[in-house]
Image (cartoon, rainbow, N blue to C red):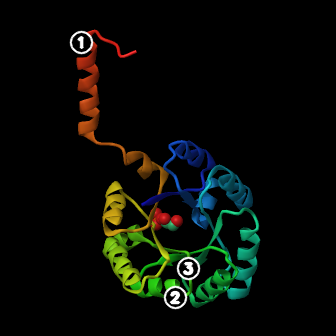
Amino acid sequence: MKFFIDSAEVSQIAELSETGLVDGVTTNPSLIAKSGRDFKEVIKEICSIINGPVSAEVAATDKENMLREGEYLAGLAENIVIKLPMSWDGLKVCKIFQEKNIKTNLTLCFSANQALLAAKAGATYISPFIGRLDDINLDGMQLIADIRAIYNNYSFSTQILAASIRSVNHVSEAAIIGADIATIPPKILHQLVNHPLTDKGIDSFVRDWKSTGQSIL
Ligand code: G3P
């Protein structure tokens, strides 16, 4: 499973990329607004830090303007992926970008049929939003499973990018189902390594090692 960071905070992205475990980044207009910074500057900085794909979202919702914005954003760096909203216009632009070899991420996916459309339109990534479905008492993880089954049935190459991840369990459950990627907020990514028994075990090993009076080096 690939790990993307779901953030527009350049310092957090730089810090996490030092782990060597970060394969890409996703942003969205809300994350850009939260950063309080200039969209294009932030995207260029992220692209210079991260070798993998960086999703930058169009602001327009009509075909012509999405095409113009997407082409502009694709020119900012080689690793840009154009994030498009799930709509007929978004799907049309997705198909055009596929023909132009511009990578796309179809976002705001909440149903298996939307994911089927994205795959047929040649999307590079589909972003089903797990947490937002859970928020309204629907089963976000079931959507990941349904999309995995559909894509396997027809050997679609669109990659499933589990998004709107709110807990460490979302990450492991999406991995068990076989999502290709999880885009993870920095806070959750940090939490992935934690386990109270690990902390307890390290403490007791450190204590017992000291009691031997030995040193390895
Ligand atoms: O980048 C899209 C996504 O991960 C949004 O998450 O927490 O705003 O639902 P959230």
Tell me, yes or no, whether the two marked residues, 2 and 3, touch with CB atoms within 8 Å: no
Tell me the kind of residue under disc 1. Ser
Residue under label 2, please give it.
120
Residue under label 1, please give it.
211
Give how far apart the Cα atoms at labels 3 and 1 are. Answer: 58 Å
Residue at the image point whose x is 23% and y is 38% from the top: 197
Give how far across and how far down residue 172 sits, in percent.
Answer: 32, 59
Residue 74, quarter of the rendered image? bottom right
Tell me the kind of residue under disc 3. Ala
Q: Is mark 3 within 8 Å of ligand 1?
A: no
Residue 51, quarter of the rendered image? bottom right
The secondary structure type at the circle numbered 1 is helix
The secondary structure type at the circle numbered 2 is helix
Residue at the image point whose x is 68% and y is 58% from the top: 43
Q: Residues within 10 Å of mark 2 (few under 14, many from 20)?
A: some
Nearer to the camera, 148 or 68:
148
Q: Is mark 2 within 8 Å of ligand 1?
A: no
Tell me the kind of residue under disc 2. Lys
Residue under label 3, please give it.
123
Give how far apart the Cα atoms at labels 2 and 3 are. Answer: 8 Å
